[in-house]
Amino acid sequence: MNDNKDSIFRAVYNIAFPTMIQMLLGTSYHIINTIWVGLLGSFSLAGVTSSSFIIWMIFSIVSITEVGVNSLVARYYGAKDNENLNKVSFYGIRLGLIISLIVGLLFLPNLENIFLYIVKLNKDVTSVALTYLIPFICILPLYIISSTCHSIFRGIGDTKTPLKIASFYLTLNALLDPIFIFYFNFGVSGIAIANFISQLFDITACIYILKNRNIINTKFKNFFDFKVFKSISFIGIPIAANGVIFCIVYLFLTRIISTFGHYPIAALGIGHNTESIAYTFSLGFSIAATTLVGQNIGAKDYYRAHKIAINILYYSCTFTLFYCLILFLFNEKIASIFTKEKEVLNYATNYLKVIAFTEVFLAMEIVMEGIFSGKGNTLPPIIIGLPLNILRIPIAYYLSNFYGANGIWVAIGLTTSLKGIILTIWYYLTTENLKTSYQNISKI
């Protein structure tokens, strides 16, 4: 393969750019949702923000299939191994459905206790969070089918097809949201109803196209294939576990934040929505890294796999630097898009000031996760991420005694920076292991 910079840029661009556009559409949808919810008042905004940590946790668990399928599909596509590519695609969706049903059974009976006794929210905020979350969990199987199908497309290097599907799905969703929230007066539950209708379209289109391309087929007779499940889980579980711990940490951080009232909780939601733009671009580069590193390792072109990894890291950090400058210069104007309440605005502005100095390191962390996933070695992100995520709690508690909620924002930024720096150093110290990582992935 040609390994000059232009060919690498084109390869990254062809996968990353459509993925970024798709994710930006999703991010825009969530930002618009936050604006709609903000019109319902700060209690509603705080409730939806609090429930978002549970949603992240659930998405982290079910991402076992998304991460594992993306990596393995890319690997077998690069190796031109259609039999195993078909197996991973078919059983990946089935594994995702099994995981989503287990997650639903575990979470639904315990949601109220999580909010009241672990996070220690007041009853008004808890009521909003439950109204938002319960319908979401009920339609979780639809999310997992959709995300797994999209990861299959990305694994074969096709990010344009899911972009087209997602564009229609998200547009439909954005149009239906205010209708169900305000016209039919469902409040935050209207978001889940709109999601259900839109997700049905997404799934139908994805499966139809994948079956026509003979990537998903029904020739496999066994309901379970433990070898496939094991291979997917081997790659996906470390990333998923890191995500779950991250969310549990945020539940405890929310408990600390709630001691200062519901205003900083609402501000955190604004901060996360703003931060999600940089996160989205970084995740697009990360997915490109998983796909292209995986494909080139599958084709046994280890040198090109390494060059692609380094270039993607450079592209991601360069973009994020520009975004950091925007956050630093216009933090108050950005926060005012979401709320006019002075108390919420003050907390949100300070949050954006802090993350303006740390988003580059967030980009490094996310891209490194994608590179390690492409290598088939997802242990480094959890080895580094787990202790640093947990350390956020004592650091946030200590700093909040001196600086209030702003001390918590500093704790988040500090640990994010350390994760990005250490993971990048780890990769540079282990680049010789690309060939070994390929050999350690056994045939399904």
Image (cartoon, rainbow, N blue to C red):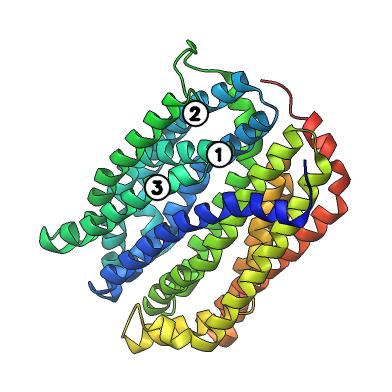
Q: Which mark is residue 64?
A: 1
Q: Are marks 2 and 1 in contact (CB under 8 Å)?
A: yes
Q: Is residue 377 visible?
A: no
Mark 2 crowd level (few <14, some 14–19, many ≥20, 10 Å Cα): many
Q: Position of residue 287 (x, y in %)?
A: 60, 49
The residue beneath circle 3 is: 164
- Residue at 49% across / 86% down in the picture? 330
Mark 3 crowd level (few <14, some 14–19, many ≥20, 10 Å Cα): few
- Residue at 34% across / 44% down in the picture? 137
Q: CA distance from mark 2 to mark 3?
A: 26 Å
Badge 1 amino acid = Ile
Badge 2 amino acid = Leu
Q: Is residue 110 left or right of residue 314?
A: left
Q: Position of residue 19 (x, y in %)?
A: 51, 52
Which mark is first along the chain, 3 or 2? Answer: 2
Q: Are marks 2 and 3 in contact (CB under 8 Å)?
A: no
User: Against 35, is 3 above or below?
Assistant: above
User: Against 118, is 302 above or below?
Assistant: above
Badge 3 amino acid = Lys
Foreground mark, 3 or 1, reads: 3
Q: Which mark is residue 95?
A: 2
Q: CA distance from mark 3 to mark 1?
A: 25 Å
Examine the image and state in which quarter residue 120 appears. bottom left
Q: Position of residue 218 (x, y in %)?
A: 44, 16
Foreground mark, 2 or 3, reads: 3
SS assignment at label 3: helix
Quadrant (top left, top right, bottom left, bottom right) of the C terminus: top right
SS assignment at label 2: helix
Frontmost residue, 249 versus 164: 164
Residue, far top: 221
